[in-house]
Image: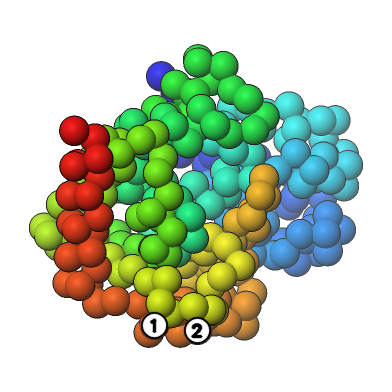
């Protein structure tokens, strides 16, 4: 099983960055300009809310003259096993008070059942060993624990009908997966809306999108494609993503009608599995 993420380690890493930056006589804005990062990103790292990627750490070492310190200690922040491009989003996810996600072809990670997630990791590229699959699976199931608290975060899942119809792992796996989503929706832990095929083109056709809100930080957006993802923090871009999501949500079925459709498709899978 993957090792738990350690917020204290991230905080210590951030405090060291702040100490080295101040020793160099630089403000956050001045350091950000020299390492080609945003001031907000520097602030998040220093507060223990974010980790730099490898290239960011190398530039920090170069500008601050820290002889590889920030690159060398990156592995101590990894904690849980996820795709490299998702690490920053994972840290934000654990702090969010509200999350809205759009799934174009797969069930969003925090809603995935064990068997469904196992099938997803088993078919990923580059190929993963059984041990690696188990490590990624442990992280994905651990992420779902954010739904254990009824009140936080508020979670809204917008699913393309493709998610319901694409058979991942066979009818039995799909039946279990869809009924898991229905159960979460029935107990009002999540809101779920399905974009039916009949809608045709809509504003979220281009890929996965996650919107997150926080108590003490401005909202962010995370957009993901094939083997890549990016966190958007510029307020104008985040607002644009929110508007795109809301337009697509306006085309979707209501929560109640979406649950009815999920139940119906799950029953079809149950019959197919018998």
Q: Callout 2: 10 Å neighbours few (<14), some, many (20+)? A: few
Helix, strand or loop at mark 2: helix
Residue 27 figure quarter: bottom right
**Residue 146's spot in the image, x, y percent?**
30, 48
Residue 265 figure quarter: bottom left
Residue drawn at x 67%, y 45% is 227
Residue 143 figure quarter: top left
**Residue 199's spot in the image, x, y percent?**
43, 79
Placement of 202 over or under 118, stated as above or below: below
Q: Callout 1: 10 Å neighbours few (<14), some, many (20+)? A: some
Placement of 67 over or under 174, stated as above or below: above
In the rendered image, the quadrant that contains the N terminus is top left
Residue drawn at x 39%, y 34% is 169
Residue drawn at x 41%, y 40% is 168
Q: Is 239 on the left-hand or right-hand side of 110?
A: right
Q: Nearer the viewer, residue 164 or 98?
A: 164
In the rendered image, the quadrant that contains the C terminus is top left
* Residue 149 appears in the rendering: no
**Residue 71's spot in the image, x, y percent?**
75, 33
Residue drawn at x 18%, y 56% is 263
Which residue is tagged 1? 251
Q: Is 33 on the left-hand or right-hand side of 54?
A: right
Which residue is tagged 2? 243
Count of marks, rendered view: 2
Q: Is 233 on the left-hand or right-hand side of 266?
A: right
Q: Is 82 on the left-hand or right-hand side of 5?
A: right
**In the rendered structure, which disc, 2 or 1, sits on the residue that comes first in sequence?**
2
Helix, strand or loop at mark 1: helix
* Residue 187 appears in the rendering: yes
């Amino acid at each position: 099983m993957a090792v738990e993420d350690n917020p204290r380690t991230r905080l210590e890493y951030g405090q060291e960055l702040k100490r080295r930056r101040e020793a160099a006589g630089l403000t956050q804005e001045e350091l950000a300009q020299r390492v080609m990062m945003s001031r907000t990103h520097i602030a998040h790292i220093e507060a223990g809310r974010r980790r730099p990627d490898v290239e960011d750490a190398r530039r920090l070492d170069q500008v601050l003259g820290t002889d590889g310190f920030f690159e060398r200690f990156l592995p101590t922040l990894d904690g849980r096993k996820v795709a490299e491009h998702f690490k920053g989003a994972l840290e934000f996810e654990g702090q969010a008070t509200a999350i809205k996600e759009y799934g174009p072809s797969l069930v969003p990670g925090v809603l995935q059942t064990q068997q469904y997630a196992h099938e997803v990791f088993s078919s990923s590229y580059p190929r993963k060993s059984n041990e690696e699959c188990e490590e990624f699976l442990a992280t994905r199931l651990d992420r779902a624990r954010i739904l254990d608290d009824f009140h936080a975060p508020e979670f809204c899942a917008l699913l393309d009908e493709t998610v319901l119809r694409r058979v991942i792992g066979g009818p039995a796996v799909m039946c279990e997966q869809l009924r898991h989503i229905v159960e979460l929706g029935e107990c009002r832990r999540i809101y779920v809306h399905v974009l039916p095929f009949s809608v045709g083109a809509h504003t979220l056709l281009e890929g996965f999108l996650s919107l997150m809100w926080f108590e003490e930080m401005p909202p962010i957006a995370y957009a993901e494609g094939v083997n890549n993802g990016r966190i958007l923090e510029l307020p104008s871009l985040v607002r644009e993503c929110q508007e795109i999501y809301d337009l697509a949500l306006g085309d979707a079925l209501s929560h109640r009608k979406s649950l009815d459709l999920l139940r119906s498709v799950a029953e079809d899978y149950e019959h197919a599995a018998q």
